[in-house]
Amino acid sequence: MEDKRVFVDTNILLAATDTDREHHADAKSFLEGSFSGAWRAFACPQIFREYLVVATRPVKNNGLGLSPAEACGNVETFQKLVQTLSEGPSSQEKLAALILRHNLKGKRIHDANLVATMEAHGLRLLKTYNPQDFRPFAQISLLGHSLNQ
């Protein structure tokens, strides 16, 4: 049986919101697929926090310039399409192992946290527009991208 569970990176939600982004149509189509049952989309709290940071940041600072109310409203809508996975002791143990195995530092730990959360919940498929960020993590596959890009 095919596993139709997909973990969603923050850039998917941002692209779905911003009609000027290169991947806007693809992101909307992906989320519509979740709504129609083509797959089940998942994220962790980090994804929604990252979305809120970028969505409320001014456009001149590479944000979307949304008001807090608009951004929170969008997250509420996304959470109807994307199930939130917890980050508990298991994902924290997996995160520490990934950090040590790959000698990760700084912002790279954010990506490792997503992979650790996926592992803790048995997910292997990730939807992202930044495939290069996930090259070190052979235990996952990317929806629509190769890890070798």
Image (spheres, helix red, strand yellow):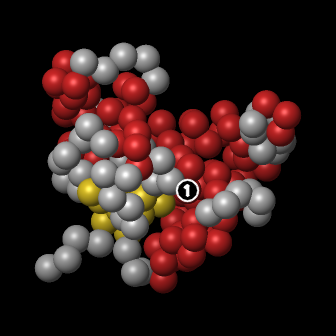
Q: Is residue 27 above or below residue 134?
A: below
How many numbered badges does the structure rendering display?
1
Residue at image location 19% in from the left, 53% down from the top: 122
Residue at image location 38% in from the left, 61% down from the top: 145
Q: Amino acid at mark 1?
A: Ile
Q: Position of residue 84 (x, y in %)?
A: 42, 51
Who is closer to the viewer here, 103 or 80?
Answer: 103
Q: Quadrant of residue 25?
A: bottom right
Q: Position of residue 108 (x, y in %)?
A: 40, 27
Query: Quick one: which residue is furthest to the front in this view?
Result: 149
Query: Quick check: can you spot residue 106?
Result: yes
Who is closer to the viewer here, 49 or 26?
Answer: 26
Who is closer to the viewer here, 98 or 70?
Answer: 98
Q: Crowding near pointer 1: few (<14 within 10 Å), some, many (20+)? A: many
For disc 1, the marked residue is: 12
Q: Quadrant of the N terminus?
A: bottom left
Q: Quadrant of residue 146?
A: bottom left
Residue at image location 40% in from the left, 39% down from the top: 133
Q: Position of residue 113 (x, y in %)?
A: 34, 33
Q: Is residue 76 left or right of residue 127?
A: right
Q: Position of residue 78 (x, y in %)?
A: 58, 59
Residue at image location 51% in from the left, 66% down from the top: 81
Query: Quick check: can you spot residue 69?
Result: no
